[in-house]
Amino acid sequence: MAKRIEVLIGENVRKLRERNGISQAELGEEVGMLLGSSWSRSTVSQAEGGKRSFVAAEVMALASVLGCQVQYLFTSSEGEAIRISDAYAFAPDFGSRLDTSGVDDEQLRRVYSKLRMTLQGMPALTAALKEDLQKIEDTTKHAAFLLELDDVGGQGDGKDA
């Protein structure tokens, strides 16, 4: 029987989290910061157990925090078929084997082409997001340092008076 996509993503998240030596709570905190919403240890546990569906932003955040390409989260190392719904199941290499040349529907060909381009651009997008996050972190540290200097300077002036 084919494995549900949520289970596959969850297994890959768990593998990477454990390989990186971070707890479920730490992963949840970092993903939540990227998403701007709460991601608790319980949410991570549900995700790793395949009991949670994902939106694209969550998959991007997980990949960024775990230091992998988005495609890795969708990759089966055991060569099993992947079920994305009750009606459809794909072999692990379905993306490389899908051929739209015989499809008459022009819209389907355009959608597949856009999807392929999007997937090819994911590593660059992930790298750009990491770079932006580093800039935000650096700016935040700098601002905190300046506030500390201002506090020290303000206290010193108050004592001299």
Image (spheres, rainbow, N blue to C red):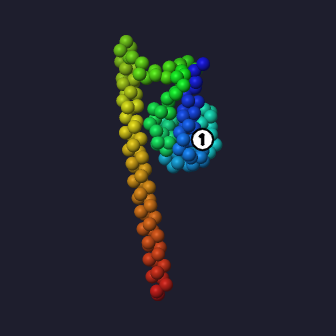
Of residues 150 and 21, the one drawn nearer to the viewer in this rendering: 21
User: In x, y percent, where is residue 6?
Assistant: 57, 30
Q: What's the amino acid at mark 1?
A: Val
Q: Which quadrant of the view contains residue 146?
A: bottom left
Q: Position of residue 24 (x, y in %)?
A: 60, 44
Q: Nearer the viewer, residue 38 or 48?
A: 48
| Left-right relation of 23 to 74 | right
Q: According to the image, label 1 marks what residue? A: 44
Residue drawn 62% across the image and 34% down it: 49
Q: Nearer the viewer, residue 145 or 54?
A: 145
The percent position of residue 96, horizontal first and vertical second, equals 41, 22
- Residue sitting at x 50%, y 20%: 91
Question: 58 above or below 152?
Answer: above
Residue 103 versus residue 131 in the image, above or below: above
**Residue at position x 46%, y 22% from top?**
93
Total tally of numbered discs in the picture = 1
Asked if residue 133 shows in the view, the reply is yes
Q: Is residue 120 left or right of residue 30?
A: left
Q: Residues within 10 Å of mark 1 (few under 14, many from 20)?
A: many
Residue 40 in view (yes/no)? no
The image quadrant that residue 1 belongs to is top right
